[in-house]
Amino acid sequence: MASVIPASNSSMRSDRNTYVGKRFVHVKNAYLDSMDEDILYHLDLGTKTHNLPAMFGDVKFVCVGSPNRMKAFALFMHKELGLEEAEEDIKDICAGTDRYCMYKTGPHVMVIPSISIMLHELITLLHHARCCDVTIIRIGTSGGIGIAPGTVVITDIAVDSFFKPRFEQVILDNIVTRSTELDKELSEELFNCSKEIPNFPTFIGHTMCTYDFYEGQGRLDGALCSFSREKKLDYLKRAYKAGVRNIEMESTVFAAMCGLCGLKGKLFMNA
């Protein structure tokens, strides 16, 4: 488990350009600066209705995962950090919407996907809050390839169904290809931490991202199946040979958006 050091009060300034930090969260959208108000609709937050720097300015780590997992993780981190407020004070910050929920424990934020919508608004939120040196970790489950059940895979590169390190985003009527490489130092740091935990088998490997849970991942039990068992096994063998160790449905967009916005991102997933 990673530790967090929040920004000290002396390092905050009214002008974000004088903030004493290494790397700000930045957005690739010139229109934001001209907006009178930015409403993060799916998070039930906004630049006029909430003081985002005060609420989130100390955030260094963001973890995303399923609702129950993130609530449990927030309570766990509350105990680990030895925070003074009562556990019942850990409230869902996004309680005004039924699309997402969010918990803040010290300088940790736990958020629940759908990943693309969430990342757009989460990264914009971190930008408005003037956060710097932020790491986002996706915690969850996945399907393993050639590894024992229960093994944790730390993703070094997210690949598509052709085993290529890319995310193809359709923008208007164009297909834009973006890189999906993740921070290598963070992979090694997490891997070294895993060695300190007994009975915690961990690999660093490629994670393959598919468009759906059934046919895209070679499953034989969906409403549609257009391939044979033999073709499925051949495909999975080629995936393993290409370095893939697990499969899920969010890694490429996660990696691409983190990279473009100057964020350290990592997937830490149980197979």
Image (cartoon, rainbow, N blue to C red):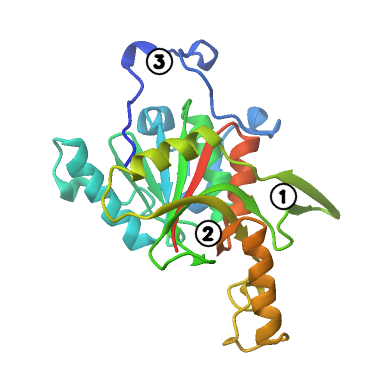
Q: Is residue 66 above or below residue 131?
A: below
Residue plotted at (17% across, 43% down) = 79
Instruction: State the image coordinates of residue 227 (x, y, percent, origin top left).
Output: 72, 85
Find numbered disc 3 in the image and state the secondary structure of the residue it sits on: loop
Question: Is residue 50 visible to us here?
Answer: no
Mark 3 belongs to which amino acid?
Answer: Met
Mark 2 vs mark 1, CA separation in Å: 20 Å
**Relative side of 245 to 54, left or right:** right
Task: Please give the label number shown on residue 223.
Answer: none
Q: Which residue is mark 1?
A: 166
Mark 2 belongs to which amino acid?
Answer: Ser
In this rendered view, identify the residue nearer to me: 190 or 147.
147
Instruction: State the image coordinates of residue 46 (x, y, percent, origin top left).
Output: 48, 40
**Relative side of 80 to 73, left or right:** left
**Relative side of 75 to 52, left or right:** left
Find numbered disc 1 in the image and state the secondary structure of the residue it sits on: strand
Question: Is residue 208 visible to us here?
Answer: yes
